[in-house]
Amino acid sequence: MELVNIAAAAAASWVFGAVWYMALSKPWMAAAGIECDENGRPKGGMNPTPFILSAVAMLIVAGFMRHIFATAGITTAGAGFTAGLGIGLFFISPWTMINNAYAGRPVMLTLIDGGYATIGCALIGLVLSLF
């Protein structure tokens, strides 16, 4: 049952990411420096590799968050959501900011990516604690 729980939590965050980045695609592509064609799509077409890697990454994050939650005794939806929010906001987002700052990337890229990490981890925490 735990594998289903982990897969559901990962899927929730991955689907949210699809919605998040579709809604913020133009500012994200501008901040990331992605060249677009005349239709506003990335030059060279879409590569499926990032989608596959992001799905695998969500499984890894959800799996380890499940371990952390079990060890810490996090069992309620509120505690799961809050712990996930904290992981995204205070672990992943600062690391993203460091990487972007050293690469000289725009702050907007950090805000978009950090926002996804924060809300995505909160969703993972919520779903993990619902089962």
Image (cartoon, rainbow, N blue to C red):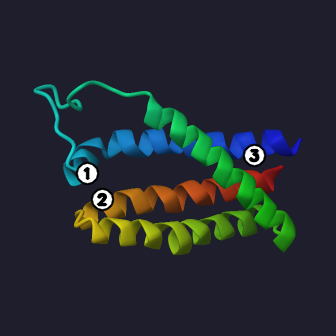
Say few, some or many: other residues with alpha carbon within 10 Å of mark 3 (under 14 / 14 to 19 / 20 or more). many
Is residue 126 depicted above or below 14 in this figure?
Answer: below
Q: Quadrant of the N terminus?
A: top right
Instruction: Report which residue position mark 2 lands on.
Output: 109
x, y (%) of residue 126? 70, 56
Instruction: Report which residue position mark 3 lands on.
Output: 6
Which amino acid type is marked by label 3?
Ile
Asked whether residue 73 appears in the rendered view, the answer is no
The CA distance from mark 2 to mark 1 is 6 Å
Residue 85 lies in what quarter of the image?
Answer: bottom right
The structure residue drawn at horizontal position 61% and vertical position 60%, both measured from the top left corner, is 122
Say few, some or many: other residues with alpha carbon within 10 Å of mark 2 (under 14 / 14 to 19 / 20 or more). many
Is residue 11 depicted above or below 119 in this figure?
Answer: above
Pick the residue in front: 42 or 18.
42
x, y (%) of residue 111? 35, 64
Instruction: Report which residue position mark 1 lands on.
Output: 32
The structure residue drawn at horizontal position 43% and vertical position 60%, both measured from the top left corner, is 115
Badge 3 or badge 1: first in the primary sequence:
3
Which element is circle 3 on?
A: helix
x, y (%) of residue 82? 65, 70
Count of numbered circles on the image: 3
Is residue 19 depicted above or below 71 in this figure?
Answer: above
The structure residue drawn at horizontal position 65% and vertical position 54%, both measured from the top left corner, is 61
The structure residue drawn at horizontal position 60% and vertical position 69%, both measured from the top left corner, is 87
Query: Badges 2 and 1: C-beta atoms under 8 Å apart?
Result: yes
Say few, some or many: other residues with alpha carbon within 10 Å of mark 1 (under 14 / 14 to 19 / 20 or more). some
